Amino acid sequence: MNFIDVTRRVAVALAIAMLLGACPGEAPVAPTADSADTMDTASDLAPEVAGDVAPDAAPDVAGPDLPPPTEHTVTVTVTLDDVPTGDVLLVQGGTARTWRTGPDGVVQVTLDMTIDGDIGIVASHPEARTWAETIYPSLLQTEVTIAMTRYDPTDNPEYIFQDPGEPDNSPTTAQCGHCHITINEAWYASEHRTAANNPRLHDIYSGRAAALADSAACADALGAWVDGQLPGTDEVAQACYAGPSALADMNGGCTPGTDCETTATEFGGCANCHAPGIDGQLGGRNLLEAKGLAYDYGVHCDICHKVDSVDLASQTPGVGGMLNIHRPSEQGSISLGAWRPLQFGPNPDVPNIRMGNVPREHFEKADLCAGCHELEQPVLVAGTSIDSTRWPSGRLPIHSTYSEWKDGPMNPGAPCQSCHMPPDPDVLNSADLQLFGASVGIVGGWERPPGAVRRHSWLGPRAEGSKMLENAAALFVDVAVGATDVTATVTTKNVGPGHAIPTGEPMRSMVLLVQARCAGTTLSPTGGDAVPDYGGAVATQDGSGDWNVWPNAEVGDVIRVVARPGGFHDYAGFGPFGDGTFDASAKGLAVETVVGEVSVTAVAPDGAVTLDGPLPGGDVAYLTRGDSDFAGLPGMAFARVLVGADGSRMVPHHAAVDIASDNRLLPQQAWTSVHTFETTCAEPTVTARLLHLDAPARLSRAKGWTRTVRTMTEVTR
């Protein structure tokens, strides 16, 4: 448990308890539906007790000499809009006891009277806010009516999304973090919070290169230093625009900068998932409209908990498509806000009127995540079209994490939430209130079993310390030593996730590197599988080019040469790359084997290079730079390779017109590669290392990004 500012939390709990008509230690009764509809002030929240006798004046039915009962049976009638209603779920708060009303709206319930806090009977119905009645030990009511009211099914575009707040800065119940402290802390540290303000997102969307912070750096990158809108604001300032631009590509002909930003009419649906909290119209918004809460907080509490249903048949991810958002339309009050609270969540036993809770099963299913993490996309680049013979649906599978899981071994037992929202055993209740003075029950919630509350952290490959990357894959290395060479057979296997690795954003990739050594000296490769071009290269030339001329070369660059002996790898990838639709050639991954490499020692103005040795003979040459360009090295790479209209590979998905290959490893799937090295000793060692790359090398250079390379696993034999 992360205890921050206990004094503040106690004050928070006391204030909320007072606001909701209960002091710590008291057992409040939920207001009737009629009283809640007419609340205007904090005093209107005072609970009413069934009958005419106040709790303090009620007779002690157990008698002065009799112990209180451990169980008590009550006949409960549930009405919905004043009509007795069947099949309504009843829960005794703080227990696992549940019942359902009969066709006449009536059911007998036997309550555990020994639990801590309120003895509350909570009713939930998919068309009404959760409601409750309290059974008082001093009254032991035998008949109770719970009157529920349907909420207005109309989505309200005038609703303003609620401020989620921040750790140590959630001063009132207007911020979710005021009560949901632990959840707020986890969300604030997550990638969901930065979904709308991620600089790389805006670099690709508008064409900016924010890391190139002055005109000189911009010119070196062949960019344009022009006026453009500062993301998250209405301000216009000069900035560098270099590399791909979604707005320019989708709105053919406009110039990146204010030209595209003020004239664009096609927005690609980016904001539907990255900035879903833009008030007003849902879906189809310009990402540059995200300002204030929508920009600062991205995907926050009041977005996810306004998801009434998920429509996976829709072909549009996010709000306005797969995620059906329902914003409340009933008038609120001074104490509850302009609109009567309405939230959707996983639990049927949350009757706190400040929440307006309606339970929904999709919060515990992968379907909810699919609302943004599943995307089949038409070609978006203006003036281009898709190859309908290769893609008869007219769409490219861009994000397929949900489908990968659905077709894998973890469906249905381990949905996305199992790993990406792991249980938090230290948290007793999502609101954190009863630890700091609020009454246990209707106001503060009941204690849940350890681990019942999940961390709202959405751990992913960028989450340091999560061990998700480290636990995703395993390497198995077999070494055979000959008289003059050593052969390493390396198997890379997806052993952890219920989806492919890598998954999600197609710019990600994995690279396997294989090295052999004798007493610390690196051995030269003599053949075997090579890392393909998407492992990273500055430039590529086939046999028709002049390998002595590289206009982009710099001293210190390395030219790696590979052979293409013919044929294609026949792997089992996602969709048509593994279901028999494509043959090996259509799967697009040519067999390449290592030949050798030379280093650049000088570069002439015309790009002619001087090398430290003769160029090896082969079929393809890769110009590589630094320690994060891996094309041509002994190894392999795994990625979904998107192709642009000009043939560029590993393009951002807005620019894709085809998918050249997709050899990512599906759940429990393995790939075996073979590598040979000359040996100078009887017992060489072989090291295999699997890396995770967050972005393509060429795009990173164009935008000035720092490419992140992380080791997933490493084995030495």
Image (spheres, rainbow, N blue to C red):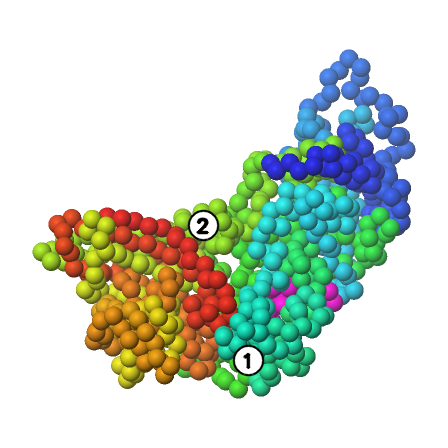
Q: Amino acid at mark 1?
A: Asp
In the depicted view, which residue is nearer to us: 410 or 533? 533
Q: Residue at x 31, y 69 (%)?
A: 558
Q: Is residue 280 magenta?
A: yes
Quickly name the residue at label 1: 249
Q: Could you tell me which secondary element the residue under label 2 belongs to?
A: loop
Q: Is residue 149 left or right of residue 240?
A: right
Rendered-image quadrant of the N terminus: top right
Q: Position of residue 489 (x, y in %)?
A: 22, 56
Q: Residue at x 51, y 48 (%)?
A: 418
Q: Position of residue 439 (x, y in %)?
A: 75, 33
Task: Give the tally of numbered discs.
Answer: 2
Residue range corresponding to the magenta coloring: 268-281
- Residue 468 is tagged as 2
Query: As drawn, which residue projects farthest toward the left?
Result: 483
The answer to whether residue 126 shows anywhere in this view is no
